[in-house]
Amino acid sequence: MVPPAERRKPMKNTIARLAGALLALTLTTGLAAAQSKVTIAIGGGACLCYLPTVLAKQLGEYEKAGLNVELVDLKGGSDALKAVLGGSADVVSGYFDHCVNLAAKKQELQAFVVYDRYPGLVLVVAPSHSGDIKSVKDLAGKRVGVSAPGSSTDFFLKYLLKKNGLDPAGTAVIGVGLGATAVAAMEQGQIDAAVMLDPSVTVLQGTHKDLRILSDTRTQKDTLETFGGEYPGGALYSTLAWINGHEKETQALTNAMLATIAWIHSHSPEEIMAKMPDEMVGKNKDLYLAALKNTIPMFSETGKMDPKGADAVLAVFSVGSPEVANAKIDVSKTFTNKFVDQAKKTTGSAK
């Protein structure tokens, strides 16, 4: 006869297995619930100026922060902005200047983490026109490519034209994207000049050693010469309504971005390139690496918005846009550092 204690063992084992399975199911369900879905619209994912947004995905930083992030790659910053304003995306990975420009239209947008401390915009002359276009003033009546009309590349062009005494309306603006399409438009003579970003600039320089550059904001020196101060570029931003209604997700995105820029500044360009998607690196890895080396100094080390930089953006837009100049914009409302400050308190990841 089997003792009662022995008969109870199989039942105990069965209960233990059921309890274990229930616990595993509960943990899995909880993990799935913790992964908040966020859609980020990027204003041209191939551009190195937006590398931190893509790299965060490659490193798994969004997942570590409790997010299920979908990246949607669009032609330019204006298209990414339209996606958020239209409700098909939650957050823009694009240039901060859109927040200032839209404030003049009474639309409340707010940047919450900055990953580019310089804009990296470069005004380049098409190889076939290097002999007759030697200054910005020579662009009068010419065809100039931008990523998309209404994007930061377009704003930059209009600012330079105005600064050099030209009427921006006298120059034809043509959307050519930021990657291979922009390079092709330049080489095939579809445009006379273009506002470009890396890696496209370095790709062109690789095949055209005498490439003429009229303005370059990839370094602090050139940025200061162009704008009179530092000028923030890429940032994560959204509508104020979305941020206020999704503070947990906004904080998680900030944490992921700060972890990513810290990783960038503690790894070599070769290690960074190895993490990027093959389709973004392209076939010529040497040129991509050279472009990456040019770009790394652009990336912020803190994620914070410098209020003076935000003021510089407002000043630039006020020069080229009477609407912005007359709108009496409170630029302090177009960004917040509270999420970066909170990350610093909890993780020490920001300076």
Image (cartoon, rainbow, N blue to C red):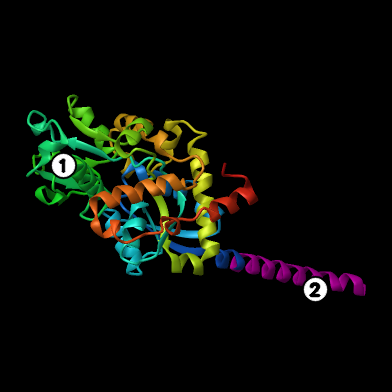
Residue 263 percent location from the top left of the image? 51, 39
Circle 1 — which element? loop
Which SS type dominates the magenta stretch? helix
**What is the magenta range?**
1-29
Nearer to the camera, 198 or 242: 242
For the N terminus, the image quarter is bottom right
Which residue shows up at 24% across the image and 55% down it? 321
Residue 59, image x and y in percent? 49, 46
Membership of 9 in magenta stretch: yes
> Is 73 on the left-hand or right-hand side of 126?
right
Asked which secondary structure carries label 2, the reply is: helix
Query: For the residue carrying disc 1, how many other residues have a C-alpha within 10 Å: few (<14), some (14-19), or many (20+)?
Result: few
Report whether 107 appears left or right of 245.
left
Q: Earlier in the sequence, mark 2 or mark 1?
A: 2
What residue is shown at x 41% (from left), y 56% (from top)?
Answer: 331
Residue for badge 1: 165
**Which amino acid is tagged 1?**
Gly
Label annotation for residue 137:
none
Task: Residue 128: give x, y in percent of width and height.
Answer: 8, 33
Which mark is drawn over residue 11? 2
Near-viewer residue (176 or 344): 344
Q: Foreground residue, 94 or 205?
A: 94
Amino acid carrying mark 2 in the image: Met
Residue 24 seen in the figure: yes
